[in-house]
């Protein structure tokens, strides 16, 4: 049952529902100690009794807690009261990139701006050893200050990438994964933006996020999904076997360097 306005969770007070994210319900709330508006993500009761779901919920908080970056939604708190598990985060005003793309492709200057901001946030996550595993337009918020990464509910942690590595193109070596939530062979994420190894149920690393980022960039520039199909099976087949049409076919103003970035994802 959704929480009603005025519900108290420690120092936090529920104001109104905002929406849903993965297995969580998101509310606008107030931190009464600081008189600060916050986002409160609740694990619904039907999931709270499932150990794997609860661990995934808590893992999201642990993943975000490692990250401090202008292009990643900030974590404030993690708590539990009367059987209600919740995460308190920065409240972001704006719209998701998915909602914006429903209106059509972005102007090229915004593609480059938001693309760079997402890349910077993703690079920081990878440097801290966090792989998102569900990068998609719905998990990117566009605010007045820029793009921010959201929803690390499927994230996993690994050995951090050392600072001397070559940025976003680097891969994580010698992984030291925490206890996995899913066995190899389980498909995790959103099909249209999955990497080939995710489609095949293999282990995902930083390169998987970079592949997904390329698919997101393609959609930002063209207004079309890089991989399409009438079912999950046909989408999966396209990811494994097809190369998307060049960006320039749908966006003549796209610089050749953008096509290179997407192809080299």
Image (tube, rainbow, N blue to C red):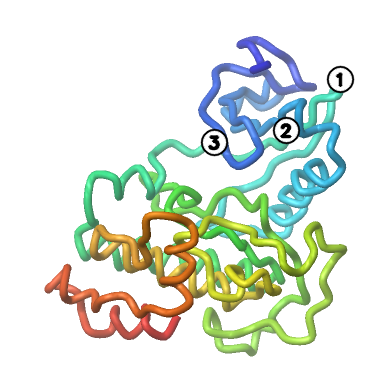
User: Picture coordinates of residue 238 (x, y %)?
Assistant: 41, 71
The answer to whether the residues at label 2 and label 1 have Cβ atoms under 8 Å apart is no
Depth-wise, is mark 2 or mark 1 nearer the camera? Answer: 2
Residue appearing at x 71%, y 37% in the figure: 87
Quarter placement of the N terminus? top right
User: Picture coordinates of residue 192 (x, y %)?
Assistant: 45, 60
Which sits earlier in the primary sequence, circle 1 or circle 3?
A: 1
Element at badge 3?
A: loop
Quarter occupied by residue 4: top right
User: Distance from label 2 to label 3 (Cα)?
Assistant: 17 Å
31 or 101, which lies in front?
101
Quarter occupied by residue 265: bottom left
Residue appearing at x 53%, y 79% in the figure: 168
The relative height of residue 150 versus residue 218 in the rendered view (above or below) is above
168 or 186, which lies in front?
186
User: Distance from label 2 to label 1 (Cα)?
Assistant: 12 Å
Residue holding disc 1: 82
The relative height of residue 177 versus residue 83 in the rendered view (above or below) is below
User: Picture coordinates of residue 43 (x, y %)?
Assistant: 72, 33
Quarter occupied by residue 16: top right
In this rendering, would 15 be left or right of 31?
left
Residue holding disc 3: 91
Residue holding disc 2: 43
């Amino acid at each position: 049952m959704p929480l009603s306005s005025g519900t108290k969770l420690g120092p936090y007070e529920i104001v109104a529902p905002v929406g849903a994210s993965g297995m969580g319900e998101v509310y606008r709330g107030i931190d009464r100690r600081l008189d600060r508006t916050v986002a409160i993500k609740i694990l619904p009761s039907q999931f709270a009794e499932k150990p794997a779901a609860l661990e995934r919920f808590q893992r999201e908080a642990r993943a975000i807690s490692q990250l401090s970056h202008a292009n990643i939604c900030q974590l404030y708190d993690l708590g539990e009261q009367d059987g209600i598990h919740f995460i308190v985060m920065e409240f972001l005003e704006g719209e998701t990139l998915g909602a914006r793309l429903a209106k059509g492709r972005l102007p090229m200057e915004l593609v480059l701006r938001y693309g760079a901001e997402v890349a910077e946030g993703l690079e920081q996550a990878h440097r801290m050893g966090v792989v998102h595993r569900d990068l998609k337009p719905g998990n990117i918020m566009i605010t007045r200050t820029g793009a921010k990464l959201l929803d690390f509910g499927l994230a996993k942690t690994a050995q951090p990438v050392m600072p001397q590595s070559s940025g976003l193109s680097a891969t994580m070596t010698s992984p030291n994964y925490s206890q996995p939530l899913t066995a190899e062979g389980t498909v995790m994420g959103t099909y249209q933006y999955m990497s080939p190894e995710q489609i095949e149920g293999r282990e995902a690393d930083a390169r998987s996020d970079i592949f997904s980022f390329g698919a997101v960039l393609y959609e930002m520039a063209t207004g079309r999904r890089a991989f399409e199909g009438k079912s999950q099976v046909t989408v999966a087949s396209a990811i494994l076997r097809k190369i998307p049409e060049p960006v320039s076919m749908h966006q003549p103003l796209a610089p050749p360097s953008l096509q290179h970035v997407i192809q080299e994802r």
